[in-house]
Amino acid sequence: MCESDLIRRQYLLSQCRYYNGESEPLRSLPEGCALMWDYEWHWVQRSLKNDPMMEQFQRMIEEFHLENKDGDKTPLTMKALLLNRYLHWCGAYASIEETLKHFEKWYMDHYLVRSTNEERKDYASPIFGISRHRMGVDGKGVTTLVTFMGCPLKCRYCLNDKCHENIYEEDGRTLRRGIQMLTPRQLYDIVKQDNIYFQATGGGICFGGGEPTMQELFIIEFAKLCPMNWKITLETSLDCSYNTIKALAPYVSEWIVDIKSMNADIYYRYTGKNSAVHQHLECAKRLLPLDKVTIKVPHIPDFTTEEDVRESIRELGEMGFANIVECDYVKRVTRITK
């Protein structure tokens, strides 16, 4: 993806209300919004690829005389996609005017109830941990570890299995204990108290989780607030798209990538998801300085043998990665449901 396409993607994401570049809907979305997330995901992908369906949406704009009212700035192709889905599920009325009347009510009641990512530049993300004064475990220098809710993997021995829980109590409004909804500015105001430590030691903020790459725009907006000498580190499984890695690359100083295993069968049995590790690492090779990437290869009880770990390290070496460290997982029971 060239620079102009990356800029275009950022623009498209800024116009969305539910989709924010994630690989799957966040649990922080209000109930019933996953379908809107899916519609916006398709709109962004089709727009970037100049999909023929976009021409159909343009024809719908003309046929139904689609326009925005009362300050609504939704791109008309997005509105046409929503109309397409409305017609699919609800059908048309006797006239275009009657159809539009009912569609506009549905559109206002179900889509416009949430502001755009651009309007919410300081939108809040669910965070369940802010751990200060960490040394030598989350990148260089003194760091503060910030952990997000949400992860596309369901690892059997997940250390932070809380990240998979719903963020709200049963009433759907009250945040569960220990979870904060913070904007990039609010997070910065909390962590800036340790600026002197970050500056003196070459440290900064480490984002983990959960999977921090699901919070691409949050991290970018946060990084723009930080002093130049702060280091931004990600502890990630790298289970994200090429576009996400490219968007984050200018803002992230160090990538700590936990690959689980290079063996696809082991990866699936441990995470519950088909492996795309090789593809994601190839993306990293193309986009990131390799001296800024540390690969963690874990010894996983009941899943990997010494030979499996050695084979993963060998494959990584052949790919060109030099910063490879072994680590030990602890066997534990989690609350994650497959």
Image (spheres, grey):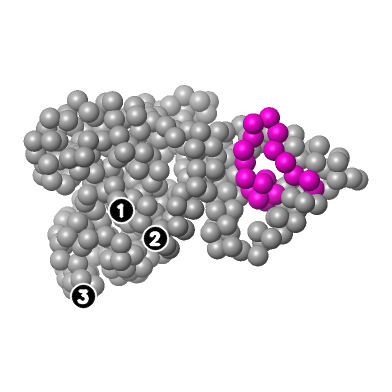
Q: Which residue in the structure is indicated by mark 1?
A: 249
Q: Main secondary structure of the magenta part?
A: loop
Q: Which residue occupies 45% across, 52% down?
A: 7
Residue 212 position, x and y percent, is 34, 46
> Disc 2 marks which amino acid?
Tyr
Q: Which residues are magenta?
A: 64-82
Q: Is residue 173 magenta?
A: no
Q: Which residue occupies 54% across, 43% down?
A: 16
N-terminal of the pair, mark 2 or mark 1, is: 2
Q: CA distance from mark 2 to mark 1?
A: 11 Å
Q: Nearer the viewer, residue 115 or 150?
A: 115
Q: CA distance from mark 2 to mark 3?
A: 21 Å
> SS class of the residue under badge 3?
helix
N-terminal of the pair, mark 1 or mark 3, is: 1
Give the vertical position of 186 relative to 13 (above or below).
above
Q: Which residue in the structure is indicated by mark 3?
A: 318
Mark 2 vs mark 1, foreground winner is 1
Asked whether residue 165 is in view, the answer is yes
Total labels: the figure holds: 3
> SS class of the residue under badge 1?
loop
Left-right relation of 33 to 215:
right
Q: Is residue 73 magenta?
A: yes
Left-right relation of 58 to 282:
right
Q: Which residue occupies 22% across, 49% down?
A: 253
> Disc 1 marks which amino acid?
Ala
Q: Which residue in the structure is indicated by mark 2?
A: 242
Estimate how packed mark 3 is, as few (under 14), some (14 to 19) or many (20 or more) residues with alpha carbons within 10 Å: few
